[in-house]
Image (cartoon, rainbow, N blue to C red):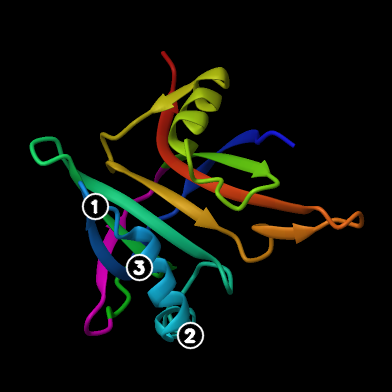
C-alpha cells in the first residue's frame, strides 16, 4: 500500500506544548530523543501532567525556530497542555496560539510516515485551496495518535496513520 494522504483544516485552539528539546542540524538527534523519552519514564510523566489536553497516549513532535544561517531548527518531543500550564523543571515549552491548522493524515503500511510528510501535506493543502501561513506561528508538528498510529487489520497487515500539522490560510 502506497502512502495515502487525507487533508483537513481545523481551528486550532491555543495550547502550551511541553517536552524535551534538541537542536537538529548536521546531526539528527530526534530518533535517540524519542527512544530515550519513551523508555526512561519521561513520556509517562508528561502523560500524567494534570494540565495535559492532548488525548491519552498521543505524542507530538514540535518543529520550529529554523535558523537559515546554521540550517538548524528546534525539535521538541512532548504533549499539549492548557495555556499557561506550569512547566516542570528540566522541560522546555512553547506556546502555540489560536490559528488555522492544516493537517495531513498520512496512512501506509510502514511506521516511517514522517519521511516527506511536510511536502506531502503542503501538496494536499494546496490541492484543497490552502497555503502554509507562518505569520502567526512558524512551526510544523508531527502527531502520533495512540488510537490511530498503529492498527492491525483482520488480514494481519499493519496500517499506520500519522498526522502532520502546518499553520495555513485560504489561498487568495
Q: Which residue is mark 3?
A: 33
- Residue in view at x 60 percent, y 60 percent: 145
- Residue 132, by quadrant, is top left
SS at mark 2 in the image: loop
The residue singled out by tag 1 in the image is 27
In this picture, is 169 found above or below 17? above
Mark 2–mark 1 Cα distance, whole angstroms, equals 31 Å
Tell which residue pokes out farthest to the right in this image.
Answer: 154
Return the residue found at the far front.
Answer: 27
**Mark 1–mark 3 distance (CA, rounded to whole Å):** 12 Å
SS type, badge 1: loop
First in sequence: mark 2 or mark 1?
A: 1
Q: Position of residue 17 (x, y in %)?
A: 35, 64
Nearer-the-camera pick, 101 or 142: 142
Q: Quadrant of residue 91?
A: bottom left
Q: Nearer the viewer, residue 82 or 38?
A: 38
Q: Secondary structure at mark 3?
A: helix
Q: Residues within 10 Å of mark 2 (few under 14, many from 20)?
A: few
Please name which of the two marks, 1 or 3, marks the residue nearer to the observer.
Answer: 1
Q: Residue 48, which numbered label?
A: 2
Residue at point 39%, 61% (across, down): 31
Magenta-highlighted residues: 88-99
Q: Earlier in the sequence, mark 2 or mark 3?
A: 3
Amino acid at each position: 500500500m502506497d502512502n495515502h494522504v487525507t487533508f483537513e483544516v481545523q481551528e486550532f485552539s491555543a495550547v502550551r506544548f511541553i517536552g524535551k528539546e534538541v537542536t537538529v542540524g548536521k546531526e539528527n538527534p530526534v530518533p535517540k530523543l524519542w527512544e530515550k523519552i519513551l523508555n526512561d519514564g519521561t513520556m509517562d510523566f508528561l502523560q500524567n501532567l494534570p494540565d495535559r489536553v492532548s488525548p491519552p497516549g498521543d505524542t507530538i513532535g514540535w518543529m520550529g525556530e529554523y535558523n537559515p544561517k546554521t540550517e538548524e531548527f528546534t525539535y521538541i518531543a512532548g504533549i499539549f497542555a492548557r495555556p499557561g500550564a506550569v512547566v516542570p523543571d528540566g522541560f522546555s515549552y512553547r506556546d502555540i496560539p489560536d490559528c488555522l491548522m492544516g493537517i495531513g493524515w498520512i496512512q501506509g503500511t510502514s511506521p516511517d510516515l514522517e519521511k516527506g510528510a511536510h511536502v506531502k501535506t503542503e501538496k494536499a493543502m494546496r490541492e484543497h485551496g490552502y497555503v502554509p501561513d507562518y505569520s502567526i506561528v512558524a512551526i510544523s508538528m508531527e502527531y502520533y495518535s495512540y488510537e490511530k498510529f498503529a492498527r492491525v487489520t483482520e488480514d494481519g497487515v499493519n496500517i499506520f496513520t500519522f498526522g502532520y500539522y502546518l499553520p495555513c490560510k485560504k489561498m487568495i
